[in-house]
Each structure stands twice: as structure tokens, then as C-alpha cells.
């Protein structure tokens, strides 16, 4: 038996639609046949006809057949739209986005495969009829719907955690800015001194601040990239949600680990205080050795 590459349930749905289409096609063909039969009975009563009479008869027949065929084609198009609407509505309940390939509708190989499938299904005398021709719309399984809701809730929680980390990072940046201003003020106050020890201390402070600045820039860059990845992954299908959840968990741990290092700012303040005390002590020592006027 010809197959379409579908599971049993979907293949039965295809058979139901093909049965519906065959029924509509048969009715329309009977209508076309009746058009010719009516013409024979109503117009073909004489033994001879002139060219004008034949032309008139054929024109009338053409108009009737054209109207019947056009009506059937329009009705078939509308029927297909309603069928697609049913499928898309069910997919949206699963938070899925279906795509179609219009070019495949003119694939001769696939069309011949469908023809073979129809021939095998409707010409076999041993084929069992399918009772349930009209089935209700499928609703998402409770288990699958609950799992999706749970994943959405976890993603919302991850978003909330990211916002919290972002606020903490911004507070840390403010502290860094205050530390940089304090360091700048310290550099201005001690700019005229030539002491080697003081210069080494200031250089160490500058290197520390530069390292902290680079670290925070990297942290903010990683946070922005991970947040963008999260927002894009939320729109994907169910199998991507689990992978996004794992990536977000890893990003959260990485951000929390890096954010814990912001305690270095508090250490930096303590270093500045100690260095100020050392500078004051150095000034006192230098004052002892300066000659009195």
C-alpha cells in the first residue's frame, strides 16, 4: 500500500479529507454531465444545424461549464483555507509556528505519490471504512500544556533574576565610578610629590582599577549577550525551551560568580584609606628632615 510518510492517525485524517474531496468532485462532474445532457435534450432536436446555430450552442455550453468549473475551483480553495486554519489553530495551542512550502504543491513526484495513495486506498475491496469522518478539534494534552506553562514560568523567573543581577551590576558600576573619582582626586593632591614609594602605590591602584573596569565590562557584555539569547530562544518550539533553560541557568551561575567578585571595591576603599594614612606619615617624616628657616 502506498504511504505518505505519516503516522496512522494523520494518515487516516488525510484519507477522510480525500474522501470528502472525491465526493465533492463526483458531484461537480455530475453537474457538468447534466449540462451536456440538458443541451442534448433541449437543443439537439433538429437533424441539421447552421454554423451560427452550432456556434451559439457551443458558446452557451461553454458559459455554463465555465461557471460550474470556476465555482468548484473557488470552493476548493476556500475549503483548503479552512483546513489550514484548523491545523494552525491547533498548532498555536502548542505555541508552535507551522511553515508551508508552496513549491512542493507542484512537485510531480509527490503528486503521483498522492495519486497512488488514493488509488490504493479507494480501489481496494478489502479496505475497511473509517467511521469517524468528522472528528473534533484536537486540544493540547494536559501533560504537555502543563509542562509548557512550567517552562514559561521558569523563564519568567530567570528574567527576573537577570534584572536583579543587572541592578546589582549597575550599583557596582556606581561604586566603581566613585572609586575612580576618589583615585583621581588623590592623584591631583599628590601630583607634585616625587617619592618613589608613592608613585609605585599609585601605579598599583591604577592597575587595580583598570583590571576591575575590564572585568565589569566583560560581565556586562556577557549579561547582554545571554539576555539576547534568552529572548530569541523563548520564541522557539518546545524542544528548544529545555536547551534555553539550561543555557540561562549556566549564564546565571556565571554572572553570580562574577558579581560576587565585586567585593574588591570595598577592599579598594580600604586600600585608599591606608594609602592616605601612609602618605600623611611620609609627609610628617619629610617635615622632620626639611631645614628650618
Image (spheres, grey):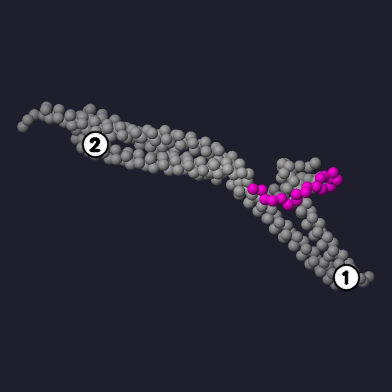
Q: Nearer the viewer, residue 112 or 222?
A: 222
Magenta stretch contains residue 128: yes
Query: Is residue 186 visible to us here?
Result: yes
250 displayed left or right of 215: right
Q: Residue at x 86, y 69 (%)?
A: 54
Count the numbered circles shown.
2
Q: Secondary structure at mark 1?
A: helix
Magenta stretch contains residue 36: no
Mark before the other along the chain sequence, 1 or 2: 1
Q: Are marks 1 and 2 in contact (CB under 8 Å)?
A: no
Which numbered disc, 1 or 2, marks the residue closer to the eye? 1
Q: Secondary structure at mark 2?
A: helix
Quadrant location, the C terminus: top left
Q: Position of residue 64 (x, y in %)?
A: 80, 66
167 displayed left or right of 81: left
275 displayed left or right of 111: left
Q: Quadrant of residue 184?
A: top left
Quadrant location, the N terminus: top right
Q: Position of residue 27 (x, y in %)?
A: 81, 59
Residue that badge 2 annotates? 187
User: What span is in magenta?
Assistant: 122-139
**Dominant secondary structure of the residues highlighted in magenta in the image:** loop
Residue that badge 1 annotates? 42
For label 2, the crowd category at 10 Å Cα-Cα, with few meaning under 14, some 14 to 19 and many 20 or more, is some
Vertical position of residue 266 compared to residue 2: above or below? above
Q: Residue at x 12, y 30 (%)?
A: 287
Circle number at residue 213? none
Mark 1–mark 2 Cα distance, whole angstroms, equals 112 Å
Q: Residue at x 83, y 60 (%)?
A: 30
Q: Position of residue 15 (x, y in %)?
A: 76, 48
Amino acid at each position: 500500500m502506498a504511504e505518505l510518510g505519516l503516522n496512522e492517525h494523520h494518515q487516516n485524517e488525510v484519507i477522510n479529507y480525500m474522501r470528502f474531496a472525491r465526493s465533492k468532485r463526483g458531484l461537480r462532474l455530475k453537474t457538468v454531465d447534466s449540462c451536456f445532457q440538458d443541451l442534448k435534450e433541449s437543443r439537439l432536436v433538429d437533424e441539421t444545424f447552421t454554423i451560427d446555430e452550432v456556434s451559439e450552442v457551443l458558446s452557451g455550453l461553454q458559459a455554463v461549464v465555465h461557471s460550474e468549473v470556476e465555482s468548484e475551483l473557488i470552493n476548493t480553495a476556500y475549503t483548503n483555507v479552512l483546513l489550514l486554519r484548523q491545523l494552525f489553530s491547533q498548532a498555536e495551542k502548542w505555541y508552535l509556528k507551522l511553515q508551508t512550502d508552496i513549491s512542493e504543491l507542484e512537485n510531480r513526484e509527490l503528486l503521483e505519490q498522492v495519486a497512488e495513495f488514493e488509488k490504493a486506498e479507494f480501489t481496494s475491496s478489502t479496505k475497511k471504512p473509517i467511521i469517524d469522518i468528522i472528528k473534533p478539534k484536537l486540544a493540547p494534552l494536559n501533560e504537555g500544556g502543563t509542562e509548557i506553562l512550567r517552562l514559561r514560568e521558569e523563564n519568567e523567573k530567570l528574567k527576573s533574576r537577570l534584572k536583579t543581577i543587572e541592578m546589582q551590576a549597575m550599583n557596582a558600576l556606581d561604586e566603581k565610578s566613585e572609586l575612580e573619582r576618589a583615585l583621581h582626586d588623590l592623584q591631583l593632591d599628590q601630583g607634585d610629590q616625587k617619592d618613589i614609594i608613592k608613585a609605585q602605590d599609585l601605579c598599583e591602584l591604577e592597575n587595580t582599577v583598570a583590571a576591575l573596569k575590564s572585568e565589569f565590562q566583560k560581565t556586562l557584555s556577557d549579561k547582554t549577550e545571554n539576555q539576547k539569547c534568552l529572548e530569541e530562544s523563548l520564541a522557539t518550539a518546545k524542544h528548544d525551551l529545555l536547551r534555553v533553560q539550561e543555557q540561562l541557568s549556566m549564564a546565571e551561575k556565571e554572572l553570580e560568580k562574577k558579581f560576587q567578585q565585586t567585593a574588591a571595591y570595598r577592599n579598594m576603599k580600604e586600600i585608599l584609606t591606608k594609602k592616605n594614612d601612609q602618605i600623611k606619615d611620609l609627609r610628617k617624616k619629610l617635615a622632620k628632615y626639611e631645614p628650618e628657616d
